[in-house]
Amino acid sequence: MELHGRFTCSPLHLHLLLGSSAIFATCSCIALFGNSFLQPNYALIIEISIWSLDYIKWWTPYKAQEVSSKVLAVHLRGTVLLKYWFQMFGAKIGSSVVLDTVDITDPALVHIGDGVVIAEGVLIQSHEMRNGILSFRPIRIGKFCSIAPYTVNQKGTVLGEGTQVPALQITEEGKPISKSKAYNIQKTPNPPFLSCNNLLINRVLHVA
């Protein structure tokens, strides 16, 4: 396509232009109508009914972030730009952090310390749906932690400084994991094995 007889717009240029416009529009909507306007006050509200207005206020930015992350943020994996993406949604992320996952479902409830490495396929989910009640708990990942691929970090997870979480593990609420505990898990002679199918089922069951 030729504009003014001098500039030729190829399909690649057009895709880049449309992609940049989509990212800009998403960021603008989030900045104007996102977290501060729609999200519930997590400091005051830790459990809400799925029939309440607070649930709708949570669900709207949650779905907007989920869709935009799968379409746009997935291309930022492994770059510093993904850190800024989740910070835009309210996450507290330290310096020198390596993110290779887009599955952070509630960024406003996530605190990631300096030097943390989070591998591909890691799920960080700060909410849980049970019996019609949506509950929230913050997730804290200490400095210099390393989370291996395809682990599931449930609401309320607390990882101490320097913790290394092996692949295919599930962290539980109310059970802080220290560096020594994670080391013991890795050194267990016959560690519990989770097949890919079991892991997929667990992740589906834990996603609202």
Image (tube, helix red, strand yellow):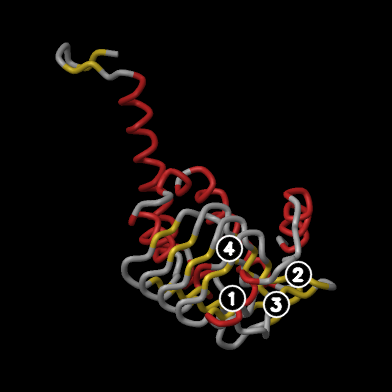
Q: Amino acid at mark 3?
A: Ser
Task: Give the numbered dot on residue 64.
Answer: none
Q: Which residue in the structure is indicated by mark 3?
A: 135
Distance from label 3 to label 4 (Cα)? 13 Å
Distance from label 2 to label 1 (Cα)? 27 Å
Q: Amino acid at mark 2?
A: Met
Q: Which residue in the structure is indicated by mark 1?
A: 182
Q: Earlier in the sequence, mark 3 or mark 2?
A: 2
At 75% across and 57% down in the image, what residue appears?
194
Q: Earlier in the sequence, mark 2 or mark 4?
A: 4
Do residues under tags 1 and 3 come within 8 Å of each other at their CB atoms?
A: no
Q: Amino acid at mark 4?
A: Thr
Question: Where, quadrant-wise, is the N terminus in this rendering?
Answer: top left
Q: Amino acid at mark 1?
A: Ala
Distance from label 3 to label 2 (Cα)? 7 Å
Q: Earlier in the sequence, mark 2 or mark 1?
A: 2
Q: Observer-nearest residue: 58 or 73?
A: 73
User: What secondary structure is marked by label 3?
Assistant: strand
At 59% across and 76% down in the image, what residue appears?
182
User: To which quarter of the image does residue 154 belong?
Assistant: bottom right
Left or right: where does residue 12 sit relative to residue 68? left
Q: Which residue in the structure is indicated by mark 2?
A: 129
Q: Position of residue 28 (x, y in %)?
A: 38, 55
The residue furthest right is 131
Q: Residues within 10 Å of mark 1 (few under 14, many from 20)?
A: some
Q: Which residue in the structure is indicated by mark 4?
A: 105
Question: Where, quadrant-wise, is the C terminus in this rendering?
Answer: bottom right
Do residues under tags 3 and 2 come within 8 Å of each other at their CB atoms?
A: no
Q: Position of residue 109 (x, y in %)?
A: 53, 75
